[in-house]
Image (cartoon, rainbow, N blue to C red):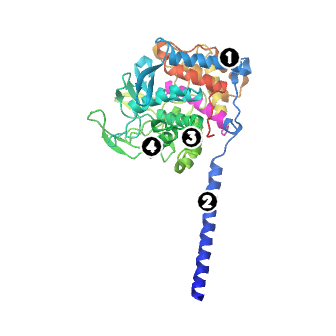
Amino acid sequence: MKTNSTQKLQFKGLSALLMVCAVLFLSARSMAQDVKLDDGKGYFKTKKYHNYFKDYGHTDKEASEKIEKTFQQLFYGDTAHATAFQAGSNENGPLMYVSDVPHYDIRTEGMSYGMMICVQLNKKKEFDAIWNYCMTYMYISDKNHPAEGYFSWHLNRSGKALDETPAPDGEQWYAMALYFAANRWGSGKGIYDYHTWADKILTAIRHREVKTGTIMGRPRVLTLGSMINEDHKIIRFVPDVQGGNFTDASYHLPAFYELFARWGPKEDRVFWAAAADTSRNFFSKATNPVTGLAPDQSNFDATPLDRKFGTREIKARFSFDSWRTQSNWAVDWVWWQKDPREQQLSDRILTFFASKGMDTYGDQYELNGDPINTRAGMHHSGGLIATNGASAMAATKPDIKKEFIEALWNQEIPHDWVERYYDSLLYLMSLMHVSGNYRIWAPK
């Protein structure tokens, strides 16, 4: 009896010790999580969204009307103005795609932008139709395919893949749009279980195992892995193991990463919190210290990526992808207000463009500010006017701020052939950003 009592006491003591250790471990984890998940001082914290147009005499109603007019033109306008098109239906419902009209194709970039626009504007029917098209024609479920678990980034307008490899920008936007949809409307079943699909895409972005194989019957063998460079905590330009060891500043989305750190798969939340800080540092390092111009492609250490194609050398420059970068850091600023350097970056780049003339600045430059040839003879592009307007949300110089926000307000909906897709989508999203109608849809 004495021995049995002693054993019981020892067991109870051990149990109590284990309980204390477990509590301390969980408390330590919770404290570490709290330190990493600083809510900042922006929209996420305050839940108050600001209409910057209102500062210059334009009402909330006027802004909403301008946004709705743009949406209707892009999604339901005639064939000379629309960029979204209905494509019949299947067992999951209606189908719709967003087209890069000038190139007669469909890209995950535009499809994911279309989904984000729809969830922000409470257009569930159109959101579901675009997502249905993505899952029907773009998603790769074949376990033997090197891009399994990703989306073909490039289709023709008949839904046939032109390239079955993925593009990380579109995949990140898919995940964020799906989380917002889950939070705003609630998840459904099958492909409309938004939250489950967001988790699945985000897990693939970071953890997709390396797979080797051929695509589209071509002899070229590809080896594709995750979309993340783990050493630098940076998004890759492509997940190609051999050829994807660089990044694109416009792919960096710290405003989204903060939300992934809160709503994404639990095992990756610490990573995404760290990735947000990495991208903020990246913006400051990658942009030119005088002009504020961001390169279209960079090494992981944020130095510009200059590449050779045979005897031809391609230097990193401020080009079409780069337009999105200043919008990305401005959105991060108003949502989180964690890094004041983003305000300095907006002041710097907008000062540069203002110096070139508000009505005449070009759309492509060397990083030092030297102009380069513009597309199709154009020099003052609607998409860049739009993202500069969004960038002004983070600017501190009153005159600069007003000039660029007013320029966005006064701009017509981009409708020239070359601007029908990229520029018009950037324009609509910039209107939503600046008017306070591009919001964080959190779990209810």
Q: Is residue 294 visible?
A: yes
Count residues near mark 1 (Cα–Cα under 10 Å), then give few for <14, some for 14-19, many for 20+.
Answer: some
Mark toward the start of the polypeptide (3 vs 2): 2
Q: Quadrant of residue 257?
A: top right
Task: Examine the structure image and report whether residue 321 is included in the region drawn in magenta.
Answer: yes
User: Which residue corresponds to mark 4?
Assistant: 204
Q: Amino acid at mark 3?
A: Tyr
In the image, what residue occupies the spot 71% across and 33% down? Answer: 48
Q: Nearer the viewer, mark 3 or mark 2?
A: 2
Asked if the residues shown at circle 3 and circle 2 are in contact, with their CB atoms under 8 angstroms apart, the answer is no
Q: Which mark is residue 257?
A: 3
Q: Which mark is residue 398?
A: none
What is the CA distance from the residue labelled 2 to the residue labelled 1? 51 Å
Asked if the residues shown at circle 2 and circle 4 are in contact, with their CB atoms under 8 angstroms apart, the answer is no
- Left or right: residue 294 compared with residue 219: right
Asked if the residues shown at circle 2 and circle 1 are in contact, with their CB atoms under 8 angstroms apart, the answer is no
Q: Nearer the viewer, mark 1 or mark 4?
A: 1
Question: In the structure shown, which secondary structural element does the residue marked by tag 3 occupy?
Answer: helix
Asked if the residues shown at circle 1 and circle 4 are in contact, with their CB atoms under 8 angstroms apart, the answer is no
User: Which residue corresponds to mark 1?
Assistant: 62
Q: Is residue 304 visible?
A: no
Highlighted range, magenta: 317-339
Where residue 334 appears, as percent x and y from the top left, is 66, 33
What is the CA distance from the residue labelled 3 to the residue labelled 2? 24 Å
Task: Examine the structure image and report whether residue 25 is included in the region drawn in magenta.
Answer: no
Count residues near mark 3 (Cα–Cα under 10 Å), then give few for <14, some for 14-19, many for 20+.
Answer: many
What is the CA distance from the residue labelled 2 to the residue labelled 4? 27 Å
User: Which residue corresponds to mark 2?
Assistant: 26
Count residues near mark 4 (Cα–Cα under 10 Å), then give few for <14, some for 14-19, many for 20+.
Answer: some
Mark toward the start of the polypeptide (4 vs 3): 4
